Image (spheres, grey):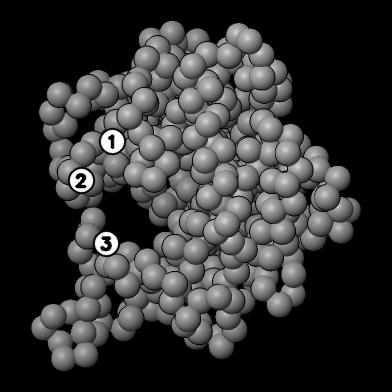
Amino acid sequence: MTVLNKMPLMACIISVLSSPIMASEFVFLEPQILASNRALLHSDDVTMSMKHSYQLLLEEADIAIQAGPFSVTHKGMTPPSGDKHDYMSISPYWWPDENKADGLPWVRHDGKTNPASKTDQTDSKRIGNFTRSVRAIALAYYFSQDEQYAQKGIHYIRTWFINEPTRMNPNVKFGQGVPGVADGRRSGIIDTRTLVERMLDSIAILSSSPHWTEADELAINQWYSEYLDWMIIDDLSGGPKGEAYSANNHGTWYDYQLAGIAYFLGNKALAKQMVQKGKMRIDTQFEADGSQPHEIERTRAYHYHYFSLDPLVGIAQLGDKLGIDLWKYKNEKGGSLIEGISFMANYHDPAIKWPYSQKDKRRRVERMTPLYLKAGIALNKAEWIRLATETDFSSFTVKNDLSEVWAQRDIELLYLKK
């Protein structure tokens, strides 16, 4: 019997629904490390790799300040509700059925992205552009202290979350819909992971600007409180058939969002419960060797092994802040988060053959490096820290390799104290 069976989700969290209270300063980032690295960056002792990462950050931020603002009301299509303030997306791996005159219902081709899911007609591409733009702008503001960045980032936040004509309703009822199947599906919650992963610490940074007001603080806390309540209660996400019960990475990303938002809002009780629930994820997702059976089934098995570890590492980081050690927890098979990371480290060298499916042209092993770093710091594993810091990022560019640029940034500026 899993932890989830023993401790039903709604029974655990219904008594600690969110309330609009003051936000936490940082969720996943550490202010002492950030401050230390900012001082070093502007000193004579700055390293070339740190300086390079900072230059790429400014390049990305300067592109971002020209890209927005962004709003769900800008999409071409109208959700079934008739309200463009509702987020709407099309599930990326679904395609029209070629054997049907009308193509309905659409059919799934795992790992093959339908371009129709990434247009301005829906919000999937837009939410990605919004969240990465705000993150780049907020970090550029932190390390440069240039208020022009803060003004732009705050304007973007107000447009997406706060201003009545353009704000997103705090739900994902119509996320990852499939024509002929459903207007919205529980997997739509995966789209909004960036509202936690990229946004919470960006908001914390931008809230230090004199351009951030008390009204902004109250409004953003209210939005996240309402969204958290929707995630817990709605059948598409937190109900008995919802994403909370998904067995693969989708379930972990759901837990990550709840844990992150709860911590951001100061709801430590709910945050602790979601970290504890991470043990159930380890129980159901890892073999003794660290492989992940639910992700092995996918056509992009390497990517999804990484994509499943990413939120679990974030939850473990919150556990460190809340006094819960998720890193060393082992399931009955001997599987653990440590084994999961070790498994991936075995294939960090691209010359070593990956044993499962790999539809991607390149394995993109650099994306794993922040996870090696975070786990290495938490567990005092020098070999994992070296794996991250000795990776060569010099050939990657903002234009072509954003994920790798972000990985270097995590190492050089955000998580490793020099």
Q: Residue at x 39, y 70 (%)?
A: 119
Tell me the CA gap for discs 1 and 2. Answer: 9 Å
Tell me the CA gap for discs 2 and 3. Answer: 12 Å
Of the 4 image quadrants, the one containing the N terminus is: top left
Q: Amino acid at mark 2?
A: Asp
Identify the disc placed on residue 101.
none
Q: Amino acid at mark 1?
A: Arg
Q: Amino acid at mark 3?
A: Thr
Secondary structure under the numbered disc 3 in the rendered image:
loop
Tell me the CA gap for discs 3 and 1. Answer: 18 Å
Q: Residue at x 41, y 52 (%)?
A: 250
- Mark sitting earlier along the chain (3/1): 3
Q: Quadrant of residue 372?
A: top left
Could you say where residue 89 lies in the image, as x and y percent from the top left? 44, 70
- Residue 339 horizontal side relative to residue 11, left or right: left
Between 198 and 267, the one lying in front of the other is 198
Q: Residue at x 29, y 31 (%)?
A: 365
Could you say where residue 246 lies in the image, as x and y percent from the top left? 41, 54
Residues tagged 1 and 2 counted as in contact (Cβ below 8 A):
yes
Q: Which residue is mark 1?
A: 364
Between 244 and 177, the one lying in front of the other is 177
Q: Which residue is mark 3?
A: 113
- Mark sitting earlier along the chain (2/3): 3
Q: Residues within 10 Å of mark 1 (few under 14, many from 20)?
A: some
Q: Which residue is mark 2?
A: 360
Can you say whether 235 is above or below 20 in the image? below
Could you say where residue 111 lies in the image, as x and y percent from the top left? 23, 56
Secondary structure under the numbered disc 1 in the rendered image:
loop
- Residue 336 horizontal side relative to residue 9, left or right: left
Secondary structure under the numbered disc 2 in the rendered image:
loop
Can you say whether 362 is above or below 151 in the image? above
